[in-house]
Image (cartoon, rainbow, N blue to C red):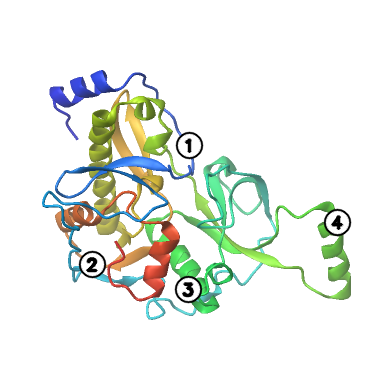
Amino acid sequence: MRFSPSFCLALVVCLISTFVVGAPYPAQPTNEVVTNENSVPVVVNQTSELWEKSQLGRRASKPIQPSWILGRFSDSKILTEEDRKVFSSELKDLKLDSRLNLADPALNNGGIWTVKEYKTYHGDISDLLVKIMPDYSTKHSDINHEQSDNLNFGEVKALKHVGDFVAAGLIKDPERSVTDRLKDKAKSLKGDKPHMYPVVVMKKKQGNTLSSFGFYRSANRNGQVMLAREVKKLTCTEVARVAVAKRALHGDRNLGNALVTFNGIRPISVQLIDWGIAFLVSEGTKFDDVFQYCMKTTKFFNNKSVDVRRAVVAETSNPY
């Protein structure tokens, strides 16, 4: 992607410091600047409902879902019996190390962990992360247990499609105390099984969220808007590339799920994380069709992740 001299000069003026950071799975920011499809900057708080304003002051219209989107990976019609067995066995060779310090890890999962040991994996374990899958039904009365399971099955299926999947299965609570461990041992002696948690082992991605960069946080509003626009373009470029190559459309597109790599003050690439909401796309889908759809429907900071999942459960065809 080429950047005009005026863009680079404006960023030099707006940004007061620069550096490059790499991180595996960062937290979502609280407040950000975003532009809608009419290039109108909007500053919002992610915890509040956003009414995207067009230049005429009306709520932005929702585009019709294109025919190349075949359905959600979590849809019961797309999930196979094999997909529903991914959490059926214990990952006995897997040992977790430390839990990542995310802003609100309980919102979308039971925690993201680094790996201390995984005997059956022959690569570098520092390239792996483990996600403890959530049970949405315990937190939200409008989501039943089957729907929650389907969301988790769908995420694993999506990870397999995009090539980020390593393994899935069950583990004991990694945060259980010594007393709990002794109780688990006593249960096993009696023939009772301790409570197990479903997890997915996945590949770590490089980059960091835009808000984690000091020069972004220190920039004035114009500088933040310019960076947000460029990151959105890079995000949709990656979304389209993956959709065409892997037949998977990322469905929870916010800056917390876009890891950015910078070259100086220029964002040069984005990698996508969190495939909890994803869609299967048709074979032969065109890159430009996906890119344009992404640019129109991606509303950074427009929703809360759990609300997106609720919309999916409620059979909303276009939860953007």
Q: Which residue is mark 4?
A: 179
* Mark seen at residue 23: 1
- Which is more foreground, mark 1 or mark 2? 1
Mark 1 lies on a secondary structure that is loop
Amino acid type, mark 4: Thr
Q: Earlier in the sequence, mark 4 or mark 3?
A: 3
> Tag 2: Cα neighbours inside 10 Å, few (<14), some, or many (≥20)?
few
* Mark seen at residue 150: 3
Q: Earlier in the sequence, mark 2 or mark 4?
A: 4
Q: Is 101 placed left or right of 274 in the picture? A: right
147 in relation to 261, above or below: below
- Which is more foreground, mark 2 or mark 4? 4
Q: Earlier in the sequence, mark 2 or mark 3?
A: 3
> Tag 3: Cα neighbours inside 10 Å, few (<14), some, or many (≥20)?
some
Q: CA distance from mark 2 to mark 4?
A: 53 Å
Amino acid type, mark 1: Ala
- Which is more foreground, mark 4 or mark 1? 4
312 in relation to 131, above or below: below
Amino acid type, mark 2: Glu
Q: Position of residue 59 (x, y in %)?
A: 20, 58
Question: Can residue 275 be seen from the camera position used here?
Answer: no
Q: Position of residue 211 (x, y in %)?
A: 39, 36
- Identify the residue shown where x is 81% and y is 74%: 192
Q: CA distance from mark 1 to mark 3?
A: 29 Å
